C-alpha cells in the first residue's frame, strides 16, 4: 500500500481479509454454501482505501495471508462516475497497477474474467437493452452474463463480487429482481456468486438480502472516524435570523470572504510549517432553473468581492454538461471528479447534490440557495465537503479543521434538522458535528504567553489501539521516518543488523540443545511409513505383514512454500536479510535452498518470532524516547506521521501535546475569563454545570491564577492519561489544567472533577494516580475532585504517596470510601 492505513482502517482491513479467506476455505469444503461479508463504515471513513488494501492482500499476499494467483474481483456499482473515482483512488492508494484495474466497456468479450484483476462494472451494462448482455451480436462471442457465470464455474470461491454502495444496489425494481440480485443469486439456472462483499454506510438493505448466506459483518465505529483526522472537526452553519430579509448577495460576499480567509490561513500554515499549499474552493448551489439574470447577479457578487478572480477559476457542474454564457462571462463545464486536482478552479456552481464522482476536500465553503424542501440535496452535498484537504487534522490552527455553510433560505428550526441528521452519522451523512452561531477564539492576550509553552511541555500519552501491525513493520516505518527527517541517518541498516542479530542469537540458543537440528530435519525430509502384505499367502491367517519407516527428502517446492511462510512471519525483508547472511557465510559452496530451509526452521518456533517482535518493540521505544526532542521540533506535517507509530505500541507511550492557536465553539450565554483561548472580549464561551462549574468558580477566585485550559478529548491538543482497561490501556482526559503564579514561577495543576459512580471510576483514578507518580514533580497539584452528599467539594491529593497507595488498594467496590478516608475539602 502507498497509503498508511489509520488504526481503524487497519483493523477493518484485517477483519475483511480474514473473513474472505475463511469463506474461500469453507466454500471449497462445501460448494453448496454461499457467503457474504459486509463492510459497514460511515461516509468519509475511507472505505475505498480499506478495500484497496484488502484486494492487494488477496492478490499479492501480506503478513496475514499468502498470495492467491486465482483471485479475481468484480466491482459493481450503479454509477460509472463512481467506478472511475474508485479506480483512480485505488491507483493512488495501492500498488495495484493500471493493467489490473479494468473498466468493462462495450468492447469487452471474454469467456471468464482474468485472475489478478479488478473489473469495474456499472449495472447499466447488464440492462436488457445493452449489447453486452447478448452474444452473437456485433461479432461478440460471449455475453457478459456468460462471463460472470463462467468465472463462477471456473474459479468458484476465488471470485469475489464486491457491491459498492450496497444499499443502493439492493433496491427493488418493481416486481422483478434487481440486476445486482441476479449477479449474486444467478439466473436461468446459473450458479450464485459464492462470495459477496458489500460495502456501505447503511448496509441494512444489503444484510437483509444476504440473510440466507453465511455472513460476517465488519463495522467501523463512528468515534474512530471522528478522531482519525480524515474528516473536519466541525461544520459551521450560518443563516439569517427569521425576522431579517435573506440578503442573497450579502451572504454570497460573506462566503467569498470566508473562502479568502481560509486561503490566507492555509498560506500562513504552509509557510510556517513547510507544508502543502491548499487552495480552498467555494461551492455555490442554486436551484434547478435559474434565470440568466439571477446567474449574472450571482457572478457579479462573486467576482466583485474576490480580487483577481478570473473566468477560468470558475466552473459549473450542471447536468447540461455545457459551458454557460452569462452576460459577458463564459463559465466552462467540468466533471466533478476532475475538480480536486485542478488547482486553477476556485469556485464551483452546482444544482443538485454532486453526490457521486465528487471528492473535493478543497471545497471548504458552501452557500446554498436551496430551500428547506431540498434538505436531502443539501446534506448530500455537505457530506462530500467534509474531508480534510491533507487527510489529517491541523493541530495548531483549529479553524482549518472546519467547513463553513451559508443557508440563506433556512430558519433556525430547519438548520437544526440538518444538525440532527449529521449528529447520528447513521445515514449517508458523515459523522461530523455541526454548530450554528459559531464563536471564533484566539490566544487570550490576558494570559501570559509562557502558559502555552508550559502546556506544550506537559507529558501526554498515546494509548495503543485494539490492534497493531507487527512490531517489525512498526520499527521499519519509524526508521524510514527518522532517515527522511535526518534524525537518524543510518536507521534502516541499523534495524536490519539489529533484527538479523536477534535471529542469529535465537539460532545459537536452539543449536545448543539440538532443537535447531531437529527442526531442520523436519524441514528437509518427510518421514514415510511403509506396509507390505504378502498377497501370495494361502489364507488370511497365513498373511504376513511387514512394517517399516524411512525418510524422503522434501522437494524444492515444499521448501519454497515454507520459506514463503517464513517471509510472512518475518516481514519487511528480515527473512530475506537473514537468508542473504547465510548464503554469504557459505562462500563458494553456497546452497540457496538449504539456506531457505534454515530460515524456515527458525520461523517454525513461536518464541523466535516473539523474540524478534520484542527486539523491534524495544528499539522503537528507545528511539522514540531518545529522539523525542528532535521529533517535537519537526513541522506539524512531519510530526503527525509519528503519531500512528506511537499508537501501534503494545503499551502506552509518551507523545507530544500541541496547544491550539485558535478554536471555534458554539455561542452561549456562559462566558469565562482567563482561558488560554478567548473571543475578542477575552471571554471563553462554554456551558459548565455541576462539579465542573463549582471547581472553575473556585479556581477563578484565586488571585494567583494566571490562566487555565479546558482539556479537550481525543486530539493532539489534549492531555491524555492512560488507565488500565480489560485488555489494554484506555485514555482518560482530565477536565482542567490551571496555571498559578508561585514562588517558583508559573506552574500547572491538574484538577479533574471525577464521577465515582461509573464502572471505570476506580481504573481511571488509578491511571491518574500513576501519572502523578511518574510526573508529579512537574505540577503544583494533581487532584481528583468529587462533590459529597452535603454539596462540598472533596479532593484527593494524588501527589501524596499515601493517597496513591490507597487508590491502588481500591478495586472498585467503593471508590467513594477513598475520598472519605483520604480526601480534603476545597474552599
Image: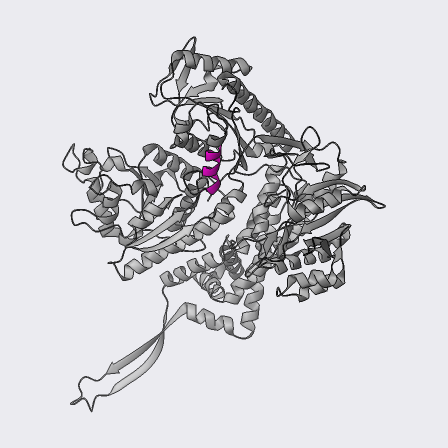
**Residue found at the very far bottom of the displayed protein:** 541
* Residue 418 painted magenta: yes
Is residue 719 in view?
Answer: no
Judge by depth and name the residue closer to the eye, 320 or 390. Answer: 320
Q: Is residue 154 above or below residue 251?
A: below
Judge by depth and name the residue closer to the eye, 598 or 295. Answer: 295
Is residue 431 in view?
Answer: yes
Query: Is 708 positioned to the left or the right of 345 in the image?
Result: right
Q: Is residue 657 above or below residue 383?
A: below
Find the magenta span and give its range. Answer: 416-425
Tell me the residue at 48%/32% (across/down).
413
Q: Position of residue 167 (x, y in %)?
A: 34, 42
Judge by depth and name the residue closer to the eye, 652 or 169. Answer: 169
* Residue 348 painted magenta: no
Tell me the residue at 28%/45% (across/down).
114
Q: Picture quarter containing residue 809? A: bottom right
**Residue found at the very far front of the displayed protein:** 790
Judge by depth and name the residue closer to the eye, 464 or 827. Answer: 827
Q: Position of residue 515 (x, y in %)?
A: 51, 73
- Tally of numbered discs: 0
Q: Position of residue 507 (x, y in %)?
A: 54, 67
Amino acid at each position: 500500500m502507498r497509503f498508511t492505513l489509520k488504526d481503524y482502517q487497519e483493523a477493518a482491513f484485517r477483519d475483511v481479509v480474514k473473513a474472505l479467506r475463511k469463506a474461500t476455505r469453507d466454500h471449497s469444503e462445501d460448494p453448496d454454501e454461499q457467503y457474504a461479508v459486509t463492510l459497514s463504515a460511515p461516509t468519509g471513513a475511507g472505505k475505498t482505501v480499506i478495500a484497496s488494501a484488502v484486494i492487494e492482500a488477496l492478490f499479492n499476499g501480506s503478513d496475514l495471508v499468502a498470495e492467491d494467483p486465482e483471485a479475481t474481483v468484480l466491482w459493481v456499482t450503479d454509477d460509472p462516475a463512481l467506478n472511475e473515482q474508485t479506480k483512480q483512488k485505488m491507483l493512488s492508494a495501492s500498488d495495484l497497477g493500471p493493467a489490473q484495474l479494468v473498466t468493462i466497456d462495450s468492447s469487452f468479450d471474454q469467456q471468464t474474467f482474468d485472475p489478478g484483476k479488478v473489473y469495474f462494472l456499472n449495472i447499466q451494462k447488464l440492462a436488457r437493452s445493452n449489447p453486452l448482455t447478448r452474444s452473437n451480436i456485433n461479432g461478440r462471442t460471449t455475453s457478459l452474463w456468460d462471463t460472470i457465470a463462467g468465472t463462477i464455474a471456473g474459479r468458484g470461491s476465488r471470485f469475489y463480487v464486491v457491491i459498492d454502495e450496497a444499499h443502493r444496489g439492493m433496491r427493488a425494481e418493481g416486481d422483478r429482481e434487481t440486476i445486482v440480485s441476479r449477479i449474486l443469486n444467478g439466473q436461468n439456472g446459473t450458479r450464485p456468486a459464492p462470495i459477496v462483499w458489500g460495502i456501505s454506510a447503511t448496509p441494512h438493505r444489503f444484510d437483509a438480502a444476504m440473510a440466507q448466506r453465511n455472513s460476517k459483518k465488519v463495522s467501523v465505529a463512528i468515534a474512530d472516524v471522528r478522531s482519525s483526522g480524515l474528516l473536519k472537526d466541525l461544520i459551521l452553519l450560518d443563516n439569517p435570523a427569521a425576522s431579517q430579509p435573506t440578503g442573497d448577495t450579502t451572504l454570497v460576499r460573506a462566503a467569498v470572504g470566508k473562502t479568502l480567509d481560509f486561503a490566507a490561513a492555509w498560506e500562513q500554515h504552509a509557510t510556517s510549517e513547510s507544508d502543502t499549499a491548499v487552495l480552498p474552493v467555494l461551492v455555490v448551489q442554486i436551484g434547478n432553473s435559474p434565470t440568466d439574470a439571477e446567474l449574472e447577479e450571482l457572478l457579479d457578487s462573486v467576482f466583485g468581492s474576490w480580487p483577481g478572480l478570473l473566468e477560468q477559476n470558475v466552473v459549473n457542474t450542471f447536468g447540461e454538461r455545457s459551458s454557460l454564457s452569462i452576460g459577458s462571462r463564459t463559465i466552462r463545464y467540468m466533471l466533478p471528479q476532475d475538480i480536486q486536482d485542478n488547482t486553477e478552479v476556485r469556485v464551483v456552481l452546482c444544482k443538485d447534490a454532486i453526490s457521486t464522482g465528487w471528492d473535493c476536500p478543497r471545497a471548504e465553503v458552501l452557500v446554498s440557495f436551496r430551500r428547506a424542501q431540498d434538505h436531502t440535496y443539501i446534506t448530500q452535498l455537505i457530506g462530500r465537503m467534509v474531508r480534510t484537504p491533507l487527510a489529517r487534522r491541523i493541530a495548531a490552527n483549529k479553524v482549518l479543521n472546519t467547513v463553513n455553510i451559508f443557508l440563506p433560505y433556512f430558519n433556525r428550526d430547519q438548520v437544526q434538522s440538518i444538525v440532527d441528521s449529521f449528529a447520528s452519522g447513521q445515514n449517508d451523512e458523515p459523522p461530523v458535528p455541526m454548530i450554528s452561531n459559531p464563536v471564533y477564539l484566539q490566544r487570550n492576550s490576558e494570559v501570559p504567553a509562557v502558559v502555552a509553552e508550559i502546556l506544550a511541555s506537559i507529558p501526554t500519552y498515546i494509548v495503543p489501539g485494539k490492534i497493531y501491525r507487527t512490531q517489525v513493520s512498526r520499527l521499519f516505518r519509524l526508521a524510514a521516518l527518522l532517515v527522511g527527517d535526518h534524525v537518524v541517518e543510518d536507521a534502516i541498516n541499523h534495524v536490519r543488523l539489529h533484527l538479523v542479530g536477534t535471529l542469529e542469537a535465537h539460532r545459537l540458543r536452539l543449536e545448543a540443545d539440538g532443537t535447531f537440528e531437529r527442526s531442520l530435519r523436519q524441514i528437509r525430509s518427510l518421514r514415510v511409513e511403509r506396509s507390505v502384505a504378502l498377497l501370495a499367502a494361502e489364507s488370511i491367517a497365513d498373511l504376513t505383514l511387514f512394517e517399516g519407516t524411512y525418510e524422503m527428502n522434501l522437494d524444492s517446492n515444499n521448501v519454497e512454500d515454507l520459506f514463503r511462510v517464513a517471509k510472512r512471519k518475518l516481514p519487511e525483508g528480515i527473512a530475506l536479510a537473514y537468508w542473504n547472511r547465510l548464503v554469504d557465510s557459505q562462500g563458494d559452496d553456497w546452497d540457496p535452498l538449504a539456506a531457505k530451509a534454515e530460515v524456515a526452521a527458525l520461523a517454525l518456533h513461536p518464541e523466535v518470532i516473539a523474540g524478534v517482535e520484542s527486539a523491534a518493540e524495544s528499539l522503537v521505544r528507545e528511539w522514540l524516547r531518545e529522539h523525542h526532542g528532535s521529533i517535537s521540533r519537526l513541522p506539524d506535517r512531519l510530526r503527525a506521521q509519528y503519531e500512528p507509530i506511537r499508537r501501534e505500541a503494545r503499551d502506552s507511550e509518551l507523545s507530544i501535546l500541541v496547544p491550539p492557536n485558535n478554536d471555534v465553539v458554539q455561542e452561549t450565554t456562559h462566558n469565562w475569563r482567563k482561558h488560554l483561548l478567548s473571543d475578542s472580549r477575552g471571554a471563553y464561551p462554554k456551558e459548565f454545570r455541576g462539579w465542573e462549574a463549582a471547581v472553575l468558580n473556585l479556581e477563578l477566585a484565586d488571585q494567583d491564577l494566571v490562566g487555565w485550559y479546558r482539556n479537550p478529548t481525543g486530539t493532539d491538543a489534549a492531555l491524555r492519561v492512560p488507565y488500565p482497561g480489560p485488555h489494554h490501556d484506555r485514555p482518560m482526559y482530565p477536565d482542567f489544567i490551571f496555571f498559578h503564579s508561585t514562588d517558583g514561577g508559573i506552574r500547572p495543576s491538574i484538577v479533574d472533577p471525577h464521577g465515582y459512580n461509573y464502572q471505570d471510576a476506580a481504573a481511571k483514578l488509578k491511571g491518574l494516580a500513576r501519572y502523578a507518580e511518574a510526573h508529579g514533580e512537574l505540577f503544583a497539584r494533581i487532584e481528583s475532585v468529587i462533590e459529597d452528599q452535603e454539596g462540598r467539594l472533596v479532593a484527593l491529593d494524588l501527589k501524596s504517596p499515601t493517597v496513591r497507595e490507597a487508590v491502588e488498594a481500591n478495586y472498585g467496590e467503593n471508590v467513594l470510601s477513598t475520598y472519605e478516608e483520604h480526601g480534603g475539602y476545597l474552599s
